[in-house]
Every structure is written in structure tokens, then in C-alpha cells.
Image (tube, rainbow, N blue to C red):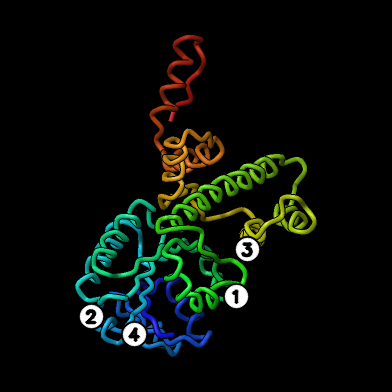
Amino acid sequence: MKLGMIGLGKMGAGMAQRLQQGGHQVTGFDPEADARKALETKGISSADSLQALVKALPAPRVLWMMVPSGKVTDDTVNALLPLLGAGDTVIDGGNSNYKDSLRRAKLYAGKGLGYVDCGTSGGVWGLKEGYSMMIGGDEAAVERLRPIFETLAPAKNQGWGRVGPVGSGHFTKMVHNGIEYGLMQAYAEGFSILQHKSEFGLDLHQVADIWRYGSVVRSWLLDLTADALGKNPSLAGIAPYVPDSGEGRWTVDEAIDLNVPAPVITQSLIERLRSRDTESFADKLLSAMRNEFGGHAIKKE
């Protein structure tokens, strides 16, 4: 199968390589010339515009987008709309909000175009290990695209599947990332407790490595944690600042809308927000209140 890849960041470029290695013909596009050149060094052709990319593909066309969620995805979707013909399909493999995917799919359906939302996990390891894909879309459309998903997945029958209609793929990936927030927070808190018990002089990399085998808390995330601690045991040079890319917020919003309690995921999101507040007014006010009602000392800056 021949398809186009839009967005040649680390993940998009890795997917293009895995597809090419699996026997598919891939043409990539990215607005950054350096990203296109990097892809070409891997033996994969590139186009210097969306128009050129669409022209390079046989009808019915398949285009996979790996671009940031929000405005960039909307801009790309809208730019493609007049270039595509009936029967063409766009796969959004990024971390779009499922509500946006529903809106875009409706827009495309009105033009006779297919739209598939694919929540994709695997990061920079996907090229080697394969990608986990949660796919939403018309059943027949997903079946036509099966060779692509089978090539990208860890195995033909593992790590991917159509989970439901359009929107369900990104919805499932949203919750996946919310769970990821909670798992990461639990590991981070546990290792922080270990690190603060200074009299034991615990080797955190050793502990992580022990837990990787036979333990009920073993996971790929723990494997990566052990790797990080092995490279940098004291985490020197890393600022205690944790970004979020949106999926955790969306998960919490959805939990509230559905009246589903999700305290762990919610608190893990709050901790990420807290990590960015280096001048916490709330904490200063707490200290001031303690001083007012109890005469407790205030620590000066």
C-alpha cells in the first residue's frame, strides 16, 4: 500500500520507517525542510507541500497525520479538504480531543471523504517495538486499512484494534493517557519516599531493577524508570517542572461530565500543575494564616 505521512517529528518519522520496512511505500511531508531531509536519509521520499504529497499518491489516497492537536490539526485538515477526492481517507494518529475528531469526521463525510481517529501509543520506541493503536472509524474503512495497522503494531494480531465508531479511538487514548498520569505519579512518589530515607543509602536504580522482575508493580514504565535512574541516579540537571499535553485534563473533564470519580488521575494532574508554581501564592498565604492564628514562624525568602 502507498500512503502519505504528514508530520515528521520523532514519532511520525519512526512510523514512516516502520511502514517502509514492512513493504509499504511512504511519502512524507513536513513544513520543516530538515525533517524532510532526515526522512530522505532513511530512503523514504518526501514532498515539499501538501499539494505535492497528495499528487504523489494514487487514488483512493490514504494520508496519516502525526501533528500536534488543536489548531495545527485543524489547519491541516482544512488545507487537505479541497485537495482530496471521494474515497480518500485521512487517519489522525495524533492526540486530538475526541470531540474535535467527531467534528472533523462529520466535515469529511459531507465531502465523501473518510476520517479515522487512531489513538497511538509507543513514542520513540515504536519503531523498534511497534505501536499500540486504538482505532475509531467506519468498520469497512478500518478493515481496508488493516495492512497499515498490522505493520505498525507489535504483531499483526496484537496491540491494535477498532474500538468503535469515529471518536472512540481518541476517547480511548485520552483515558489511556489519564491512567498513565496516575501510574507515573505513583512511581514518582514511591521513589521519592525511598530517596528521602537517607540513613539506608538506598540505590534507587537497584531497587527499580529488582522490581522489574516478578514484582506486582513491574511494567514497561518501570523499565524506563530504571533506565533513567541508571543514567542519572540523582536526576541532576532536571528541573522539577512537569508539563502536560492535554489528555489528562480532558480525562478529568470527562470523568466529571460522566459523574465518575477519578481521584488518582485528577490528583496526578494537579501535581503537574503544582510543579510549575515556583512562586506559590497559595502556600505563602497558608504560612501567613498559620502565623495569624497560632503565631507560627514564617520562613523568609
Q: Nearer the viewer, mark 1 or mark 3?
A: 1
From mark 3 to mark 4, how far is it between C-alphas?
36 Å
- Residue identified by numbered label 2: 51
The secondary structure type at the circle numbered 2 is: helix
Say whether marks 4 and 2 touch (CB < 8 Å): no
Q: Residue at x 44, y 50 (%)?
A: 247
The secondary structure type at the circle numbered 4 is: strand
Q: Nearer the viewer, mark 3 or mark 4?
A: 4
Mark 4: amino acid: Ser
Mark 3: amino acid: Lys
Q: Residue at x 27, y 58 (%)?
A: 71
From mark 1 to mark 4, how far is it between C-alphas?
27 Å
Mark 3 and mark 4 lie on one chain; the one further toward the N terminus is 4
The residue carrying pointer 2 sits among few (fewer than 14), some (14 to 19) or many (20 or more) residues within 10 Å by Cα, namely some
Mark 2: amino acid: Gln
Outermost residue on the right side: it is: 214
From mark 4 to mark 2, how far is it between C-alphas?
12 Å
Q: Residue at x 44, y 85 (%)?
A: 1
Q: Nearer the viewer, mark 1 or mark 4?
A: 1
Closer to the camera in the image, 190 or 53: 53
Q: Is residue 88 above or below residue 200?
A: below
- Residue identified by numbered label 3: 231
Say whether marks 2 and 1 touch (CB < 8 Å): no
- Of the 4 image quadrants, the one containing the C terminus is top left
- Residue identified by numbered label 4: 46
- Residue identified by numbered label 1: 156
x, y percentage for residue 107? 26, 61
x, y percentage for residue 23? 50, 88
Quadrant position of residue 226: bottom right
The secondary structure type at the circle numbered 3 is: helix
